[in-house]
Amino acid sequence: MKKYNEIEIRKNYERLTRQLIERELTITTMESATAGQIASLITDTEGSSAVLKGAFITYCNEAKIMQGVPKEIIEKHSVYSIETAKAMAKSCVKAYHADIGIGVTGTMGNVDPENESESVPGQVFLGISFRGKITGEVVEIPPQESRLMYKLAVAEEIYEKIFLMLNEQA
């Protein structure tokens, strides 16, 4: 089982933010399950205002729709889907005209009472838009000791994917 370390995750985000600054790339997020944790990690590094264009915390379905996620995608695929995560990434990039967009939706430690049939604890859907190319996937987060560690675990999964994308482009 994969272990997540808060100190290492914070160091990784400092490294990511510095790389974004160096490469003059901008980033934005639309976060549900992580409730702004990814944007927070990015802004922990001095100079992050040069790269973080803004972020949305869209904890409920209505908020996602208000920020540009098509209602039809949520109705057809559910809020817990790769399609919704990709639409979230696409919508925040469009809103902020950023190079990179991150969409995150899923369930942390317990079932969502509003979406019981689709909600699977530990199952998180990620969407990443990088210069017009949108990818999506599902990750399984093992049980964590706290809500913060669930959020940090998801943030680490996203960091790993963005880091790979950036280094493939280098």
Image (cartoon, helix red, strand yellow):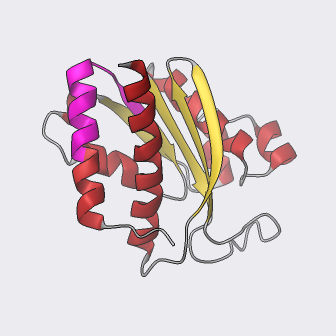
Horizontally, residue 161 falls left or right of residue 75, namely: left
Would you say residue 97 is visible in this rendering? yes
Would you say residue 36 is visible in this rendering? no
User: In the image, residue 18 lies at what x, y percent?
Assistant: 20, 34
User: In the image, residue 33 lies at what x, y percent?
Assistant: 54, 59
The quadrant where residue 133 appears: top right
Examine the rendered structure and indicate whether residue 104 appears above or below residue 98. Answer: below
Q: Residue 20 colored magenta?
A: yes
By secondary structure, the bulk of the magenta-drawn segment is best described as helix
User: In the image, residue 169 lies at what x, y percent?
Assistant: 41, 19
Count how many numbered circles sit on residues in the image: 0
Examine the rendered structure and indicate whether residue 32 appears above or below residue 68. Answer: below
**Residue furthest bottom as drawn:** 145
Horizontally, residue 161 falls left or right of residue 42, namely: right
**Residue furthest right as drawn:** 76
Quadrant containing the C terminus in the rendered view: top left
**Residue furthest left as drawn:** 46
Q: Name the residue at 30% across, 57% down.
A: 9
What stretch of residues is rendered in magenta? 14-28
Q: Residue 44 colored magenta?
A: no
Q: Name the residue at 20% across, 48% down.
A: 44
The quadrant where residue 16 appears: top left
The quadrant where residue 147 appears: bottom left
Horizontally, residue 88 falls left or right of residue 35, namely: right
User: In the image, residue 27 lies at what x, y percent?
Assistant: 38, 30
Horizontally, residue 108 falls left or right of residue 138, namely: left
Q: Name the residue at 22% across, 52% down.
A: 11
Q: Name the residue at 62% across, 65% down.
A: 107
